[in-house]
Image (spheres, rainbow, N blue to C red):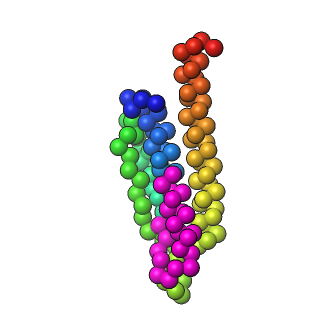
Amino acid sequence: MSITDPVGALLKSALDGFSIRQDVIANNIANVDTPGFRARSVLFEAELRTQSADGTSGAGLRPSVVPTDTPVGANGNNVDLRKEVMASVQTQFQYQLATRAVSDRFSLIRTMATGQ
């Protein structure tokens, strides 16, 4: 997809955001027993929605990695394994939906170009 294609740029930004979120979740899970570790989360959907509504390309979208507000345990760690696993599954499904949208978009472009 071309960078001049606003829908393609928004889809790319969404895929990038979901990918970063999966990396952060994996890091949280890997540190579930690390004393003092503070879990983080990734925020980007609100900005993506705003850019989509404004008709902007989404090319400059930067996901924010922020600390979570999960309560801290006795060892100073606030990773909630159940929450992280559920977030991982949800993010995986969202990523799959976005890749399906990209695939469908390419199919539409191919159909328009070839007439088939």
Q: Is residue 71 visible?
A: no
Q: Nearer the viewer, residue 50 or 59?
A: 59
The residue most toward the top is 115
Residue 109 visible in the current orientation: yes
Q: In the picture, residue 100 is in which quadrant?
A: top right
Asked whether residue 1 is drawn in magenta, I would say no
Q: Residue at x 61, y 42 (%)?
A: 97
Q: Is residue 102 above or below residue 73?
A: above
Residue 69 location (% of width, % of height): 48, 71
Farthest-out residue, front: 30
Answer with left or right where residue 43 lies relative to residue 86: left
What's the residue at 57%, 13% (across, down)?
114
Residue that appears at 60% across and 30% down: 104
Q: Which residues are magenta?
A: 19-40
Tell me if 114 is positioned left or right of 16 in this view: right
Q: Give the residue at the far left of this rendering.
A: 60
